[in-house]
């Protein structure tokens, strides 16, 4: 595709970042991301589709924080976080510098497990960073934080890092990304007959994904995204 100036727009688009996976797909083997994190609580048995997430990350543009599609761009918003996960998006920002009853201690442990295992997981997938501990020091203040903002702010850079072709794993809240794909692009969602519930991600809990790592299925995702029409997407225009 050209822009009338003699410059190949697609080639120029990939040139924005030579490390971006989009610049390597033609000449190198397909890459399937290894996902990390533990689905828990209402999201127990929420299975991730590594191939589908890998295909979407290939469309992620770090300089825009958006998925680049044929007809334009779309992204995950704070409203999506609130609707998909039920997390608060209003309130105090999450501070990183900020004893006791046994039940409160158990609650702190469980919240820490949620943070490190689902909402803000890293690629190690077996530890929780100590900088989350101060967030739980004041038990009464926990509900005042904007956890949804933190969750989205963690997912964005995780996808940015994963656009590097040499990166094999991805951190971030995969439940949010998968549920967003299922809701906004319902033809990819598992077959369910139950109505939508809140938070929306609970609708997909217990539904098995397809994780056979078949290269043909990744290719089908590529083709489907290449031919995606705007009227197939459930979204709000801002």
Image: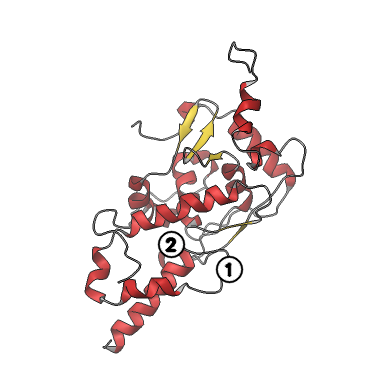
The C terminus sits in image quarter: top left
Question: Which of 37/180 is in front?
Answer: 37
Q: Is residue 147 visible?
A: yes
> Would you name the residue on which mark 2 appears?
119
Q: Position of residue 138 (x, y in %)?
A: 25, 76
The N terminus sits in image quarter: top right
- Indicate which disc, 1 or 2, sits on the residue closer to the N terminus: 2
Question: Which of 162/33 is in front?
Answer: 162
Q: Position of residue 142 (x, y in %)?
A: 27, 69
**Category of crowding for the residue at label 2, using alpha-carbon neighbours closer than 10 angstroms: few (below 14), some (14–19), many (at least 20):** many
Mark 1, mark 2: which one is toward the viewer? 1
Circle 2 — which element?
Answer: helix
Q: Is residue 232 left or right of residue 212?
A: left
Q: Residue at x 23, y 70 (%)?
A: 141
Name which quarter of the figure residue 20 lies in.
Answer: top right
> Would you name the residue on which mark 1 appears?
124
Q: Residue at x 49, y 51 (%)?
A: 157
Question: Which of 182/175 is in front?
Answer: 175
Up-down: is 151 above or below 221?
Answer: below
Colour approach in the figure: secondary structure
Q: Residue furthest top?
A: 4
């Amino acid at each position: 595709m050209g822009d009338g100036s003699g410059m190949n727009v697609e080639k120029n688009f990939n040139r924005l970042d030579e490390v971006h996976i989009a610049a390597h797909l033609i000449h190198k083997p397909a890459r399937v991301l290894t996902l990390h994190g533990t689905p828990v609580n209402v999201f127990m048995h929420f299975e991730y589709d590594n191939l589908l997430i890998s295909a979407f990350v290939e469309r992620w543009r770090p300089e825009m924080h958006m998925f680049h599609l044929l007809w334009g761009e779309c992204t995950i918003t704070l409203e999506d976080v609130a609707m998909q996960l039920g997390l608060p998006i209003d309130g105090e920002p999450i501070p990183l510098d900020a004893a006791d009853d046994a039940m409160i201690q158990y609650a702190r442990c469980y919240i820490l497990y949620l943070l490190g295992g689902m909402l803000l997981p890293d690629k190690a997938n077996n530890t929780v960073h100590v900088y989350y501990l101060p967030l739980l020091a004041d038990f009464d203040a926990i509900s005042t934080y904007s956890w949804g903002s933190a969750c989205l702010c963690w997912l964005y850079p995780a996808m940015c890092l994963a656009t590097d072709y040499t990166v094999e794993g991805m951190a971030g809240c995969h439940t949010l990304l998968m549920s967003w794909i299922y809701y906004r692009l319902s033809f990819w969602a598992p077959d369910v007959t139950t109505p939508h519930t809140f938070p929306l991600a609970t609708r997909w809990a217990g539904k098995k994904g397809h994780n056979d790592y078949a290269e043909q299925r990744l290719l089908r995702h590529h083709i489907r995204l290449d031919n995606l029409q705007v009227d197939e997407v459930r979204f709000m225009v801002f």
